[in-house]
């Protein structure tokens, strides 16, 4: 069996402000070409895990233990220079908000060609040709016009397609997608998910897909890790976790989600007893939904 592209082992972190645990022994693996969903409610720790992978944790959060291994190298032990180069070339990010992720004062073409020129040494013409090809791959019409445009001149869906194209520009081994469809309407969301899946298949890239939406998980993820309060609650294949959940919290979370195949089924809020049991396991009390 091939080694995983990404392997987190017992990753733990605390807040330097109040010493509160942020991550509690989080472990997960992502195989080559696999999409691993990192799922949880707001505050579960999923974006913190993503930032730990990318080496962009805020200064107020400190890693206290564990490993983040990318192709066998522990990212937590790498010096700043080599880490920046590795993340620039072999790990990419698709951020949540395409409007704030793109520089409003620079044209799309300039922003898409930065990476290929810096990390691959391409000249301006070759970098532009690559950008045009990538925009074509994400089904953007008139890619030449888009390269000349500023971000505010594009729709939200087009901006997100630009970010997807830019993420694949250097053919990274791993992409971290941090809730990339949250700001989009349902129709555009479906198109974006299909694009990410198609691009991933074409380039053989592994993806960590951060989301709170189990409907998105069902559409794009091969494997799922469910977090609560910085701890892994359940992990397994997407079909296993969605169809045969083992943990009471997972079952309760699924029952709280609308199902298009069960239009007449009512939604059930997560019972306070389930949340209380989880906090009891963590040694906390007095917290309810």
Image: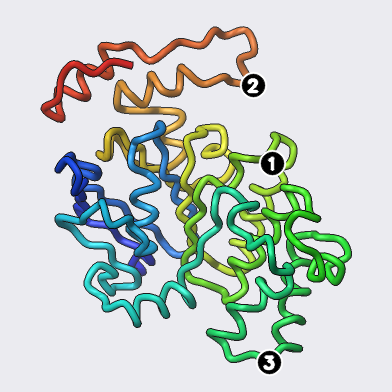
Q: In this rendering, which labeled residue sits more in front, label 3 or label 1?
A: 3
Q: Earlier in the sequence, mark 3 or mark 1?
A: 3
The residue at which mark 2 appears reads as 260
Tell me which residue sits at (39%, 63%) in the image.
54
Mark identifier at residue 123: 3
Using the image, determine if residue 115 lies above or below residue 253: below
Tell me which residue sits at (62%, 54%) in the image.
197
Q: Is residue 130 left or right of residue 75?
A: right
Tell me which residue sits at (51%, 21%) in the image.
257
Q: In terms of image quadrants, where is residue 154?
A: bottom right
Q: Describe the element under mark 1 as helix, strand or loop.
A: helix
Q: CA distance from mark 3 to mark 2?
A: 50 Å
Q: Nearer the viewer, residue 271 or 255?
A: 271
Q: Earlier in the sequence, mark 3 or mark 2?
A: 3
Q: Is residue 96 left or right of residue 123?
A: left
Outermost residue to the left:
283
Q: In terms of image quadrants, where is residue 230?
A: top left
Mark identifier at residue 190: 1
Q: CA distance from mark 3 to mark 1?
A: 35 Å
Q: Describe the element under mark 2 as helix, strand or loop.
A: loop
């Amino acid at each position: 069996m091939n080694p995983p592209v990404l392997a987190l082992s017992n990753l733990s972190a605390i807040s330097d402000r109040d010493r509160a645990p942020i991550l509690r022994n989080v472990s997960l693996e992502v195989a080559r070409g696999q999409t691993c969903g990192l799922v949880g409610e707001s505050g579960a720790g999923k974006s913190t895990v993503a930032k730990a992978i990318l080496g962009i944790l805020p200064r107020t959060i400190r890693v206290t233990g564990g490993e983040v291994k990318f192709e066998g190298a522990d990212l937590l032990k790498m010096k700043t220079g080599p880490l920046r180069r590795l993340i620039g070339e072999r790990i990419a990010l698709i951020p949540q908000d395409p409007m704030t992720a793109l520089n409003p004062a620079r044209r799309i073409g300039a922003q898409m060609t930065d990476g290929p020129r810096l990390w691959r040494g391409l000249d301006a013409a070759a970098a532009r040709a690559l950008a045009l090809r990538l925009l074509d791959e994400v089904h953007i019409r008139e890619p030449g016009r888009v390269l000349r445009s500023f971000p505010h001149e594009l729709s939200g869906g087009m901006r997100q397609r630009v970010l997807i194209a830019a993420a694949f520009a250097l053919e990274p081994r791993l992409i971290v997608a941090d809730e990339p469809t949250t700001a989009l309407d349902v129709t555009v969301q479906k198109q974006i998910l299909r694009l990410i899946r198609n691009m991933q298949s074409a380039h053989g890239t592994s993806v960590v897909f951060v989301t709170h939406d189990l409907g998105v998980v069902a559409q794009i993820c091969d494997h799922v890790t469910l977090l609560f309060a910085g701890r892994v609650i359940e992990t397994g294949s997407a079909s296993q976790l969605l169809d045969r959940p083992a943990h009471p919290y997972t079952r309760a979370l699924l029952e709280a989600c609308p199902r298009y195949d069960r239009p007449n089924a009512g939604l059930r809020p997560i019972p306070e007893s389930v949340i209380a049991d989880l906090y009891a396991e963590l040694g906390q009390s007095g917290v309810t939904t």
